[in-house]
Image (spheres, rainbow, N blue to C red):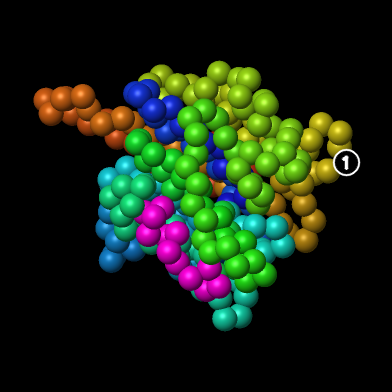
Amino acid sequence: MCTAVILYRPGHPWPLVFAANRDEMASRPWLAPGRHWPDRPEVVAGLDREAGGSWLGINDDGVLAGVLNRPGSLGPEAGKRSRGELVLEALDHAEAAEAALALSHLDPFAYRSFNLVVADAQHAFWLRNLGAEEDGGVERFEIAPGLSMVTAHDLNDESSPRIRTYLPQFRAVPPPDPETGDWRAWESLLASRGDGSGSNPMAGMTIVAERGFGTVSSSLIALPAAPATLDVAPREAIWRFAPGRPDLTDYEAVAL
């Protein structure tokens, strides 16, 4: 997964709204989000059929986790564990705060470099592992309320052309309304190609590049707040998934 948009609104009926475009080699096999792990029946996530892990998922406790590569770290490396395991390990926890704390104690040299988003209705975090060339461990940061983006670079880091181009645009448009199902503004931005200059196709939200690499799927997720009283039924999370480039593929509801 190469671009994530996080709208974190404590106290809102939908405190966490999340979008992600996954960029990957088109030849890497995967399955759409589902309950693919018999030993983790509470997890709904996309399945990376090559390594067995996931790039993005949620669990029945309302925790979301998504992993992104850091620059220059696409694909596996001999002797390193799959970063797709990190999503599943995060989703073994009932709260984002405890998941983020637990994963911050992982051996940083066991994995290639990564960014990891872990969030629920109460808290949002991003974790950074700079890889074997750095000795900083897995760093954990809280995500401040508001709208943020993360790519292969740091959170809201405008050295990323995609963040520089699209962060102001996401902040300017109306946010999704999960109650009415209106996601149009975010859908349009997720489908955008290029940075407007035509000189850098890798700066788009949707990437169509050479050598078989590009955007292969897109997700829109909303996590609801817990009911104020016990006599109010909890609302379900929402996950809308496009099993292809979002400029060409419709979003479909994921069964949760």
Would residue 11 appear left or right of 176 to someone viewing this image? Answer: left
Which secondary structure, mark 1?
loop
- Residue 114: where, in percent of width, then height? 58, 59
Q: What stretch is highlighted in magenta?
A: 99-110
Residue at 49% across, 66% down: 49
- Predominant SS along the magenta part: helix
* Left or right of residue 99, residue 80 in this image: right
Q: What amino acid is at disc 1? A: Ser
Q: Horizontal and vertical percent for residue 30?
A: 52, 60
Q: Disc 1 marks which residue?
A: 199
Q: Residue at x 78, y 38 (%)?
A: 194
Q: In which quarter of the image is residue 9?
A: top left
Q: How crowded is mark 1: few (under 14 residues within 10 Å), some or many (20 or more)?
A: few
Magenta region includes residue 105: yes
Q: Residue at x 47, y 42 (%)?
A: 142
- In this rendering, is residue 118 above or below 70? above
Residue furthest out toward the bottom? 79
Q: Position of residue 225 (x, y in %)?
A: 31, 30
Does residue 21 appear anywhere in the picture?
yes
Residue sitting at x 22%, y 31%: 234
Name the residue nearer the viewer: 209 or 205. 205
Let me know if residue 162 appears in the view.
no
Q: Quadrant of the C terminus?
A: top left
Relative to 164, 4 lies left or right:
left
**Image vertical order of residue 167 relative to residue 208, above or below:** above
Q: Quadrant of residue 39?
A: bottom left
